[in-house]
Image (spheres, rainbow, N blue to C red):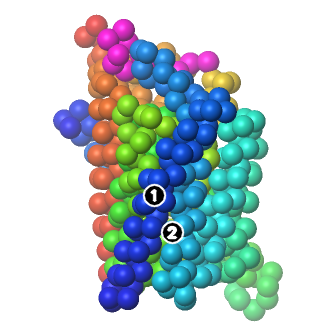
Amino acid sequence: MLDAYSAMSLGITFIATFIATFAATPIVAKLMRSRGITGVDIHKLAKIEVPEMCGLAILIGLAVGATACCLTMPLAVREAAAFIGTVLIAGAIGIIDDLHPLGARIKPVLTAFAGVPILILGTYVPYPEIPLYGPVRLTIVYPILIPIALAVTSNSINMMDVMNGAMPGTVAIVAFTMVGILLWAGELRTATLAGGLLAAMLAFFYYNRYPSKVFDGDTGSLSVGAALGALAILGRVEAVMVVALIPQIMNSFYGLSSVRGLRERREIRQRPTRLLDNGMLQASDVKGAPVTLARLILSAGPMGEKEVVRAMMILTAVSSLLAAATYWLTVSVK
Amino acid sequence: MKRILPLAAIEVFVWFALLAVTFLISKVAIEIGFGTATLAARIATQTVRLLVSGALVLGWLLAWKKVADLYLSRMLSRQGANA
């Protein structure tokens, strides 16, 4: 149950994260533009240069939020330290990848290291809750699964970050759902951290939405994915998170299986979508093109980028409702 | 909205399939046990449980992929026919 003290902590963390991310994003964007760290917005007819690596602002916002959480809820220090440690490690890998692109095989291996703070601080319970069954004892195997889980979540979010607003828009919906579910579960500390992630995503969405003024780069997407993985582990909602991330998993799993394994974007010749002369996007009909969520959405017919992102957000809202139903099924077994 | 209904339906199918897989895991994988007397027995139990669960999850992912592939090929051939 959410008492006044926890509600205050959640509120302060939310506001602090939102203000920090919202204020930091234009500053980081200006810095990146001045250093020539920009990327081309490939889904527009006018090839606009947009500042890259602005996910640094998300890292700043989440660090401020985790600090606010520690100050207002001193009992949450270990969870907040594990959370922000995980996010910062994934963010550091993202920075390296943005500056000197890493190989498609090395990136998942490196992101697995983001699980180290959770393992060192012991902020996990090796009894994951299985829907329709309840907790399962995995005391030996669970610590091995933590780095794998973080590699999966961070790279799934990274692969979803292909269109204006897709990453912060969909993750905001997942984070909002997680706040609700974690409050329902009585995991107030983790719910507060999830509130921080929600605030960071809403603030970043303002700048990243169509037409994007900033790109988060791998710095942003890998750290946000790791944040979701950390929330699932800290809050003991692993299966619920898998359901909430169905569109993201769908996107990465189809993408990987259709190109037969881990490949860097540059290695894949065929694109899943193509830009038409009228500015609309169309699904590629080439047989070897990667099967991504965007291609699946566009297979119904050409659409604008904004509409594709809206479709991704609706699909995430559906999976979030299913995640809530999964949690209800899990607790009803108890 | 109407255009993404089939994809939302795939999501719901995937969710039901996930529940079926977790039910199977609880009835098959979790029931596997080599005792808890020694560390080796505990490691063997958890490893075999994980492998069996992993195989079931892989089956879930493949079923999911099959449905999505079918949807994509159908939609693309329909688009091709319209063009």
Residue A51 relative to residue A332: left or right:
right
Secondary structure type for disc 1? helix
The N terminus of chain A sits in image quarter: bottom left
Question: Pointer 2 and pointer 1: residues touching (CB < 8 Å)?
Answer: yes
Residue A18: quadrant of the picture: bottom left
Image point 49% across, 85% down: which residue? A73
Magenta region: which residues?
Answer: A269-281
Q: Amino acid under label 2?
A: Gly
Circle nearer the N terminus (2, 1): 2
Image point 44% across, 72% down: which residue? A13
Q: Nearer the viewer, residue A139 or B29?
A: A139
The C terminus of chain A sits in image quarter: bottom left
Q: Is residue A280 magenta?
A: yes
Image point 36% across, 34% down: which residue? A210
Secondary structure type for disc 2? helix
Q: Position of residue A104 (x, y in %)?
A: 71, 37
Mark number displayed over residue A200? 1
Q: Nearer the viewer, residue A56 or B33?
A: A56
Q: Position of residue B73 (x, y in %)?
A: 39, 24
Reading the image, the residue beneath label 2 is A65
